Image: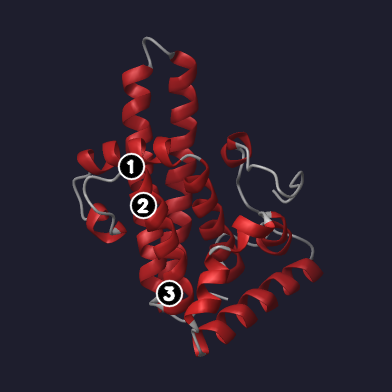
Amino acid sequence: MADGFHKPTKFPSRVFEAFHGGDDPATLSRVAHETANALLSRVRENPDPAVVERLVAYTDEHGIDAVAELWAQASARSLPGALWRLYLLRLLIRQDPTGTAFLFQRGSELAVGVDPVVAGAPTPTGPEEVVALADDILRGIFAGDFGIALDRAAAFCRIMAGGATSIADDSEATEPERSSELTTRALRFSELGQELGACARLWRSYSLD
């Protein structure tokens, strides 16, 4: 997943579609876990607002390269894996806030559970609102309840999956290629939501490392 990143490049949708995660060799895995734990421990011990805001906006200035190189190959159910997925999610939202808001709004309208409440987005949810939501979720990792932040991200992904599936169904007869693309995207969001939800449960059992 870290292959092919060049600052300041746009993160292509096709890379997200192909994303599955995985494990790096032992040395890189150790570095990923050590850096994730050190960063989180240091910031959460004294969550200076200015430092938190710089971390939230880190990829805006530096690109996704450094984050990807450190954490993209970590296990999906690990601390570095969770941090990578949260930064990835924020980047995807910021690259297409209008499209994201459209899928999120559709998914929210169809949701039958508590996911819209858990995600915490205002209604209706436009482009500015989804961008603010992404920042707020990532901010919660460094200066809030880590488990709740992961739950919010997981709920967001489930809503996005539902919205993408619905639009894919609407487009199947007239735009089969778009329908196929949205179906794939829905699957990826569903997988991402499952992984983040698992990380939230591991965090609460003091097992997320």
Confirm or deny contact between disc 1 and disc 2 (CB under 8 A): yes
Viewer-proximal residue among 82 and 44 = 44
- Which quadrant holds the C terminus? bottom right
| Quarter assignment of residue 35 | bottom right
Q: Which residue is mark 2?
A: 156
Amino acid on which disc 1 is placed: Phe
Report whether 108 appears left or right of 60: left
- Look at mark 3 in the image and give the residue it sits on: 146
Nearer-N-terminus badge (1/3): 1
What is the secondary structure assignment of the residue under circle 2?
A: helix
Extreme residue toward the bottom, this view: 45
Residue at the (72%, 55%) spot, across then down: 65
Q: Position of residue 166 (x, y in %)?
A: 31, 29
Residue type, label 3: Phe
Picture quadrant where residue 28 is located: bottom right
Residue wearing tag 1? 104
Using the numbered discs, state the Cα–Cα distance from disc 1 to disc 3 in whole angstroms.
23 Å
Query: What is the C-alpha distance between the residues marked 1 and 2?
Result: 8 Å
Residue under the image location 67 percent in, 61 percent down: 67
First in sequence, mark 3 or 2: give its number: 3
